[in-house]
Image (cartoon, rainbow, N blue to C red):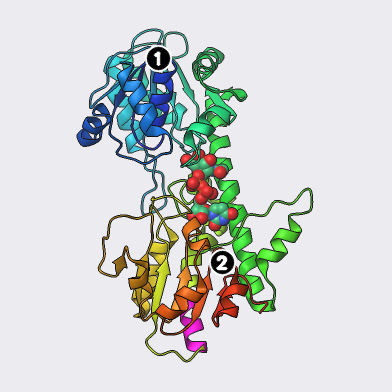
Amino acid sequence: KSLCVVGLGYIGLPTSVMFAIHGHKVHGVDVNQKAVDMINAKQLHIEENGLQERLEEAVDAGNFKAAVEPEEADVFIIAVPSPIREDKTANLDYVRKATEAIVPYVREGNLVILESTVPPRTVEDVMLPVLKDTGLEIGTELFVSHSPERVIPGKVFQELVENDRIVGGINEKSSEMTKDLYRSFVKANIHLTDATTAEMAKVIENTYRDVNIAFANELALISDQIGVNAWEAIKLANYHPRVNIHTPGPGVGGHCIAVDPWFLAEIQPDLSQMIQLSRNTNDNMPVYTANQIEKLMKDQFIQDPKVALFGLSFKANIDDQRESPSLKVILELVEKGISFKTFDPHIKENVASNQTQDMDEALDGADILVILTDHDEFKQLDPEYIKCKMNNRVVYDTKNALNLDNWTEAGFIAKRLGDSKN
Ligand code: SAJ
């Protein structure tokens, strides 16, 4: 089949490449000319395991090329961002513009698939009115569906194949056509439903995770008051066959979990109290973390403390800083007038003067080491080495990444978020 994929980012590019190496002819579209040029030159503008070799294979086979304009195809796939605005309402401009961009190229018998995560009813209420401009009758001459992406960055190629896929067509024929297409590479089950239910299911997945993490964070806050280690208590509770509590931390980052719950809150604000409360709980964790840092320093009578902040990306072992809780912790420290230096081995570019690529420089003269991301590199840190670099020996682990017994043995005051047991 010939495919036109609009949006060549974290989802669109790997998906295009997957279809191309499975025998389809893929025309990728992105508004970013630089990204287009790089892709055609077989260079990556985003990082993803296994993407480089697959991109080369796809381009070399002549099955994949990129451009800024769409062209005619059997199937159109839209994989563009769907962020939220300042006021927490969905910004569907990219989805709308991408749909408008394909209208001149859509022909009778084509299939249009939306992969972006969107508030329920977006296909019906936003996309279909635009697609009517093709002059084709929706459902008999033009087929439309929502098949939300569900892959986790870092494991995209594995999950594209192994994750169950949801396909929600605006009618049965649309669903069947979409299912046949994804069968090209999906080995897991493909579940058929309607477009709005598919939209809802996808938003539910990320909201479930956010609410569950908020619960874990609340347990951490409670544990901090009552001489309990929340990490240990949650682990024990999770041995129950019907309990699965996520882990606390300095906040929820990324462009999905911290965003998608608002899609439900926006459409039914009065009926989504728990969802909004969870969002606020998670959003407040960076503030709590900064307060805890300040308190730890006060408890040790340390004046004008210097903080070594380790971890800038929003989760372990990736280079993505979007919505990262670390950035919010930084803002709080700035507000408090506490000085700090940041270090993250996955972030290659320094954007601020108090950011360094050199771990020793970040530790030099520091009074407290704070772990904000559980990168593998941090789990290996040697307290004996680190203590020589610091001014005072205090460590605060917000991700349960360190074995604090080793740090205590090395002479550190060692504390963990959600743990007031020691
Ligand atoms: N986090 C916690 N505690 C946890 C788990 C995560 O504090 O127990 C934090 C992380 O540190 C991070 C944030 O939450 O800051 C989000 O990380 P994540 O690993 O939960 O999720 P994402 O944003 O990388 O990817 C999610 C995935 N959704 C689900 O697992 C339900 C992925 O499958 C989706 O495809 C992706 O959102 C998306 O694009 O929607």
What residue is shown with label 2?
A: 402
* Residue located 56% across and 24% down the image: 194
Residue 351 in view here: yes
Q: Position of residue 48 (x, y in %)?
A: 41, 39
Q: Position of residue 282 (x, y in %)?
A: 52, 60
What residue is shown with label 1?
A: 24
Apparent side of residue 366 relative to residue 150 in the rendered image (left or right): left
User: Residue 4, located in which quarter of the rendered image?
Assistant: top left
Mark 1 vs ligand 1: CB below 8 Å: no
Q: Which amino acid is tagged 2?
A: Leu
- Quadrant of image for the N terminus: top left
Question: Looking at the image, which is closer to me, 109 or 27?
Answer: 27
Mark with earlier residue (1, 2): 1
Apparent side of residue 294 relative to residue 105 in the rendered image (left or right): right
Apparent side of residue 136 relative to residue 195 in the rendered image (left or right): left
Q: Decide whether residue 295 is among the magenta residues.
A: yes
Q: Nearer the viewer, mark 1 or mark 2?
A: 2
Magenta region, mostly helix, strand or loop?
Answer: helix
* Residue located 53% across and 46% down the image: 268
Question: Looking at the image, which is closer to me, 385 or 402?
Answer: 385
Above or below, 49 relative to 289: above
- Quadrant of image for the C terminus: bottom right
Q: Decide whether residue 357 is among the magenta residues.
A: no
Q: Which amino acid is tagged 1?
A: His
Above or below, 265 relative to 184: below
* Residue located 79% across and 48% down the image: 241
Identify the magenta region: 291-299
Q: Position of residue 152 (x, y in %)?
A: 50, 41
Residue 266 in view here: no
> What is the secondary structure assignment of the residue under circle 2?
loop
